Every structure is written in structure tokens, then in C-alpha cells.
Image (tube, grey):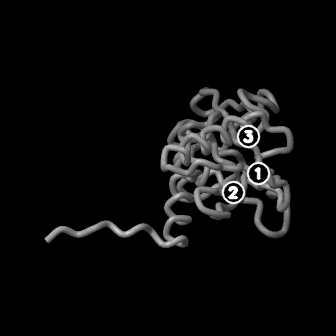
Amino acid sequence: MVTVPTPLDPTALEQRLLELAGAVPDPELPVLTLAELGVLRGLQLTGPGRVEVELTPTYTGCPAIEAMSADIERVLHGQGIPEVEVRTVLAPAWSTDDITAEGRRKLAEFGVAPPRPTGPDGPVPVALGIRCPHCGSTDTTLLSRFSSTACKALRRCEACREPFDHFKEL
């Protein structure tokens, strides 16, 4: 007996396309996906063969948003979706709290100190140190407020003397 595959219902298709868009690597931190970074805000089928995707940049004017949009379009076109509109959504603003636990783990594994959670009450208390992703020490020194991207700072661990990026809290 031959079974004929049935097309996905719209909800299942949306979920599948959201997973595919979310699996796109961040162009500046390719160890993270857009879903893990927390910038992919939503995906809706808006008609036959038409999808609208919502992205929130890590900060207004982030140059990576264009590359993210193009990568999402490419992936969804590859799934047979001819019309893909990627919209930039600025509210609610992105926060480093939007980075998933898996994303934080991957950042540390990659050698980038993940941002500390800010929580609902605002900024991180000053007493918390930035943990070195190499040795775990919190005895670290800020070398530069900016690193390879505007959302990272350059620090050095005083225990192991290794420099490392720190994803700044927002």
C-alpha cells in the first residue's frame, strides 16, 4: 500500500518554518542561532506562499540585521516559500535576557563571557563580576568597552591572563 504524504496544516507549517528561521546562525556570532540569541520574534503565514517574519535587532542600527534578514529569506525560499517579508520590530526592545540558556552555554563554550541576567528590576548589580570563560575566575579587568562588535566588550582575566570578549548586558 502506498501512502500519500499530506500537506502540513497551516499551524504545523508555521511552526516548521519558525524552527528553520530560528536555526539560522547569527552572522556575527555563528555559534548562536537567531532563536538562541532571541532576536527572532515571530513568523506568520499571511497567504498562500507568503510569510512574514519579525526580527528585533540587538540594538537600533545593528548592521547584522540585513544579513539576518537575507539568510532567513534564503532558508525560507529554499522551503518553497516564494514571498518572504522580514520586518524589523523595535518594540519591545531586545534585551540580553532574551538569550536562551543554551545560547549562554554556547557563548561560554565559544570563549565569550555571556551577559549576566538583568532580571525584571533593571540592571545587573555592580557587585557581580564577569566570569572568565577560560578558567572561571571573576577577577577580570575591562580593556575596552568595545570589541569585535558593538555589543561586546574586551576583558582580560587576571587569574589566567587570557583576553576574552564579554557580551554586554542590555
> Which amino acid type corresponds to the residue marked 2 in the rendered image?
Glu
Q: Secondary structure at mark 3?
A: helix
**Tag 1 or tag 2, which sits nearer the N-term?**
2
Which quadrant of the figure contains the N terminus? bottom left
Q: Earlier in the sequence, mark 2 or mark 3?
A: 2
Whether residue 157 appears in this view of the structure is: no
Q: Position of residue 165 (x, y in %)?
A: 67, 34
Name the residue rendered at 66%, 55% in the picture. Answer: 40
The circle drawn on residue 87 is 1
Dot 2 corresponds to which residue? Answer: 52
Q: In this rendering, which labeled residue sits more in front, label 2 or label 3? A: 2
Distance of mark 2 from mark 3, alpha carbons? 15 Å
Viewer-closest of 152 and 25? 25
SS class of the residue under badge 2? strand
Q: Residues within 10 Å of mark 1 (few under 14, many from 20)?
A: some
User: Which residue is drawn at the image coordinates 65% and 49% (left, top)?
Assistant: 84
Q: Residues within 10 Å of mark 2 (few under 14, many from 20)?
A: some
Please give the residue where the numbered disc 3 appears in the rendered image: 65
Depicted 27 relative to depicted 85: above or below: above
